[in-house]
Image: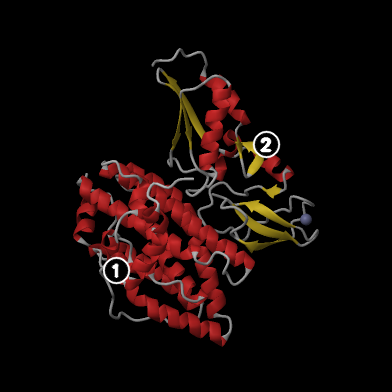
Amino acid sequence: MVSQIQYTKPQVLRMLVDVRDPEIPVLSIEEIGMLRDVVIDENGCEVIITPTYTACPAMAMIEKDIKQTLADQGIDVVKVTTVFAPAWSTDWMSEDTKEKLRAYGIAAPLHSTCDAAKDKSSIVECPQCFSTKTTLISQFGSTACKALYRCEKCLEPFDYFKCH
Amino acid sequence: MGSKEQLFKYLLRLGDNALIQGHRLSEWCSRGPILEEDIALSNLALDNIGRAQAFLQYASEVEGNGHTADDLAYRRSERQYLNFLITELPTGNFAYTITKQLFIAQYDVILFEALCKSTDTTIAGIAAKAIKEARYHASHASDWCLRLGMGTALSHDLLQNEINDIWMFTGEMFEMTELDKDLVQFGISPDLTILQNIWLDKVGSVLIKSGIQLPGQGYQQTGSQQGIHTEHLGHILSEMQYLQRAYPDATW
Ligand SMILES: [Zn+2]
């Protein structure tokens, strides 16, 4: 059945602001860079997303949330497509987005392209007290996209969103 | 373009390597030497399983007979797996796991760098994604080699032992099979003899820094690309496939 299209791409994008990354609920999937495109044609509405990490366990939940959010607004014919190329990068995060991460207690990714796996010379600032005296505890933290740091000033451990 | 069968076979190799390596790493979950390392090894496992999913998903599309990525992962028999023997070797002690990780992760970095330029755009896309993760894996393994190699006499000797033991499983990763020779011509996959030299340089420099002797050229075990595996693969499959075999089509 061909549905009557009564919505535009900007409208759909606005609706999708409500879809959050379940691990970082202060960010929408657009802010984090997972939402790649919305295609509206005679078959309905297709939402194209990309995973932050190949094994991002939140993908199934995000797909469900996208469908539910749009269904609540009366858009039923939704296909959610996952693409790998171009590969997701922390470069896609805006300064506003990074500020939201910091306010949430996660140190934001420092660099643009991080070809070298480690930026040993780089200084990660504590999101709690802004001290630059911090130590890497582990490159692999609570989720695939984060590393674990400790602040030497306030002694709090914190997550660092790794460059990708 | 290579034939559909050739591409399918190559994707099984890429997918199976990640799947079996991921499964082995997942065996460390809740058994890591320290909490941070437990989390790290579980993260490495997860990355591999995600990579397996991507390659096997594409393999199932290329095969085109209705199989899903899960069918490929959970419903083939031992002889149909094309993962390198090194990935199926038992978890062993921590130094053994780190040695396997060093050899495999360095290989992955070099391989995915080359595959980013594959004429197959889907493979290139997955490689561009996977390489970012593989670089973290390689630096994790290199760091631990340094710590074990330059640590105590015991940790040094353990690492040297495991390097010597596993070395005979590294040559297979660079074997140019008929499939490789064909796919190289189409620009789908890289020339592995070139990759081998880069790999030897990278692994060699990590080992030298860690005070570990590079083993000489010795006997190299092969067989996986003909489906001939060590006795360890059957044991992994019996555990990994149990649920799908006992309760076909089970979902949650
Ligand atoms: Zn602090």
What label does residue B229 carry, if any? 1
Under circle 2, the secondary element is: helix
- Residue that appears at 65% across and 58% down: A148
Q: Is A117 on the left-hand or right-hand side of B122?
A: right
For mark 1, does the 10 Å Cα neighbourhood hold few (<14), some (14 to 19), or many (20 or more) residues? Answer: many
Q: Amino acid at mark 2?
A: Asp
What residue sits 39% from the left and 70% below the top? B201
How much space separates mark 1 and mark 2, taking CA atoms? 52 Å
Applied colour scheme: secondary structure
Q: Residue furthest bottom?
A: B153
> Residue A4 in the image: x percent, y percent?
45, 12
Q: Pinpoint residue B236: horizontal percent, then vertical percent.
A: 39, 65
The amino acid on which the numbered mark 1 sits, given as a three-letter code, is His
Note whether residue B187 is visible: no
Compare residues B184 and A75 and report the one nearer the observer.
Answer: A75
Residue under disc 1 on the same chain as residue under disc 2: no
Q: Quadrant of ligand 1?
A: bottom right
Q: Which residue is mark 2?
A: A96
Q: Is residue B17 above or below residue B62?
A: below
Position in image of residue B130 (x %, y %): 44, 52
The answer to whether residue B5 is left or right of residue B121 is: left
**Horizontal and vertical percent position of residue A96:** 67, 36
**Residue A148 in view:** yes
Residue lying furthest front: B246
